[in-house]
Amino acid sequence: MKIYIDQSGKVEDSAKPTAIAFTNDKSYVIKVNAKTKRQIQEI
């Protein structure tokens, strides 16, 4: 099984959101907004 992954916006750039998309037979997108990334960095 092949899975294709694409990332838009660097994860470490907390001023912009990041979208991570992946697909095999189905497609999914995970969007992490800038505020959430900053909160995660504080942990």
Image: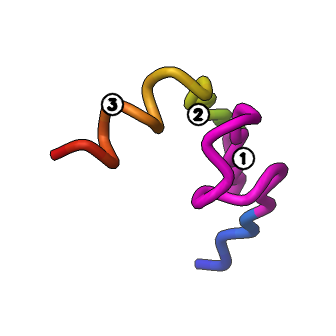
- Residue with the mark numbered 3: 39
Query: Which residue appears farthest toward the left when viewing the image?
Result: 43
Q: Earlier in the sequence, mark 3 or mark 2?
A: 2
Judged from the image, the secondary structure of the residue bearing numbered disc 2 is strand
Amino acid at the residue labelled 3 = Gln
Q: Residue at x 73, y 59 (%)?
A: 10
Residue occupying the far bottom of the picture: 1
In terms of sequence position, does the residue under pointer 3 or pointer 1 come before the other?
Answer: 1
Reading the image, the residue beneath label 2 is 30
Residue drawn at x 72%, y 65% is: 5
Q: Quadrant of residue 14?
A: top right
Say left or right for 22 vs 33. Answer: right
Q: Is residue 37 magenta?
A: no
Under mark 1, the amino acid is: Ala
Residue 1 pos. (x, y %): 59, 78
Give the residue at mark 1: 21
**Magenta part of the protein: which range?**
6-26
Asked if residue 12 is among those painted magenta in the image, a careful observer would answer yes
**Circles 1, 2 touching at the beta carbon (< 8 Å):** yes
Q: Nearer the viewer, residue 10 or 28?
A: 10
Pick the front one: 25 or 5: 5
Q: Marks 1 and 2, Cα distance to the nearest angstrom?
A: 6 Å
Which label number is shown at residue 10? none
